[in-house]
Image (cartoon, rainbow, N blue to C red):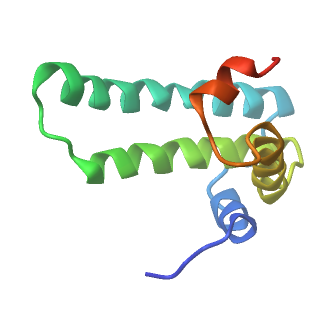
Amino acid sequence: MKIIDFIDYQKQAARTLKPNRPFEDDLADYALGLSEAGELQNKLKKYLYHAHPLDKAEIKEELGDLLWYMAAIATTLDIDLSDVATENIEKLKKRYPNGYSDEKSRERVI
């Protein structure tokens, strides 16, 4: 399987965006698409609380759907998804320079 970076992913995902719509319609459509998180939550809930088998292929598919909607929002707003990922990692490094710990989480000022 070929490894894809965020820049390439965002470019390839943009091929499937709906063309020629008002900016606000794009934002609304793609933001509402983040409801895919609910589908992911439901699959995990069924595993955790209803004794369903954990289907990693289904989880992977839902994560992919979420990634597409995030890329669509980023593209619509002219934000580089690679920058989003980089800035998030930098924030996490500052927040937890030695990795996550419960103690550091409790001490953290929001």
> Dividing the image into 4 quarters, which one contains the C terminus?
top right
Q: Is residue 18 visible?
A: no
Q: Is residue 23 visible?
A: yes
Residue 10 point in image, percent of width and height: 71, 60
Q: Is residue 28 above or below residue 7?
A: above
Residue at 66% in and 42% down? 70
Residue at 13% in and 20% down? 50
Residue 90 point in image, percent of width and height: 83, 50
Q: Is residue 4 left or right of residue 91?
A: left
Residue at 76% in and 30% down? 27
Q: How many marks?
A: 0
Pick the residue in front: 107 or 51: 107
Q: Is residue 95 left or right of residue 45?
A: right
Residue 33 point in image, percent of width and height: 57, 31
Q: Quadrant of residue 32?
A: top right
Q: Is residue 40 above or below residue 49?
A: below
Q: Is residue 4 left or right of residue 98?
A: left
Residue at the front extreme? 103
Residue 24 point in image, percent of width and height: 82, 26
Q: Quadrant of residue 48?
A: top left
Residue at the right extreme? 78
Pick the residue in front: 79 or 45: 45
> Dividing the image into 4 quarters, which one contains the N terminus?
bottom left
Q: Is residue 57 above or below residue 77?
A: below
Residue at 62% in and 56% down? 16
Q: Is residue 7 left or right of residue 5?
A: right
Q: Is residue 20 above or below residue 49?
A: below
Residue at the bottom extreme? 2
